[in-house]
Amino acid sequence: MSDPADHPPASPRRFVTTRWSVVLTAGRERSANTDPAAHDALTILCQSYWFPLYAYIRRRGCNAEDAQDLTQAFFVRILEKDVLTAADPQRGRFRSFLLTTLKNFLANERERASAAKRGGGKTILPLAADFDSAERQYEREPEDTLTPERCFERQWAITLLANVLTDLEAQYAASGRTALFQSLKPCLTGDSAPGFYAGICASLGLSEGAVQVAASRLRKCYRELLREHIAQTVESAEQVEDELRDLFRAVRG
């Protein structure tokens, strides 16, 4: 199998059909409920990016149990109702659609029954969601002055980067290079220390030049995968670059 890092990134002017563009097309044609591809694409996107919305609800002052109920009820509505027509084709970003739709949902929920009537803590979310882990992750967030919106943006960025890292690890595992990936991963996360390459040379039996080339390929593959993940949540190639800038701005806080 060839190293995925050997493949050059796609031209920024070329933009293939992605999950979000499938969803948007279905929404514009009012065919979301009859288009299995659009429903599946939306389900995958929601599965990948539900935690930032949970964090947003918690940051608005809801306790963990209420935030769990609201998140579950929100995704039931997203995945079962015809809400895709609310997606704004001028903005074309999945995260913008999600947050705007959530705000509208929460405003309506204030007029509805209590959390017990929404589900009483029962799991009704049509996605695999580990709320215990989500709450532990949320509690690790520093106590600061982040608004709910900025908390959402930050968690969106962190979630996206984590998904990219998971996919990259899977690529290396599929080609039998798990040990190489685990050794080089610190050069992606900024955790490499002085003498980093020398230590890898000793543990893997590679020359320093070979390790540096492998690290360069890993970083290249990471950048390509990052763009691919972002492309799944926007509608145009130009928005990929805009989203990249927003992502790193959100991570830096």
Image: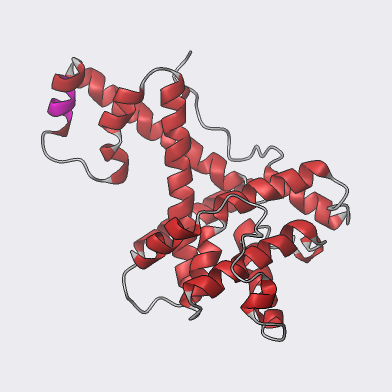
**Residue drawn at (33%, 64%) of the image:** 140
Query: Front-most of 217 and 160?
Result: 160
Q: Magenta region: which residues?
A: 197-201
**Residue 80 is a magenta residue:** no
The vertical placement of 106 against 250, above or below, is below
Visible in this render: residue 221? Answer: no
Q: Position of residue 73 (x, y in %)?
A: 67, 67
Residue 108, position as x, y percentages in the image: 71, 81
Q: Name the residue rendered at 33%, 76% in the picture.
A: 144
Q: Main secondary structure of the magenta part?
A: helix
Q: Is residue 59 left or right of residue 93?
A: left
Above-or-below relation of 73 to 14: below
Q: Position of residue 169 (x, y in %)?
A: 41, 32
The quadrant holding residue 188 is top left
Residue 22 position in % (x across, y down): 76, 45
From the image, which quarter does the C terminus lie in?
Answer: bottom left
Camera-nearest residue between 140 and 177: 140
State yes or no: residue 200 in magenta: yes
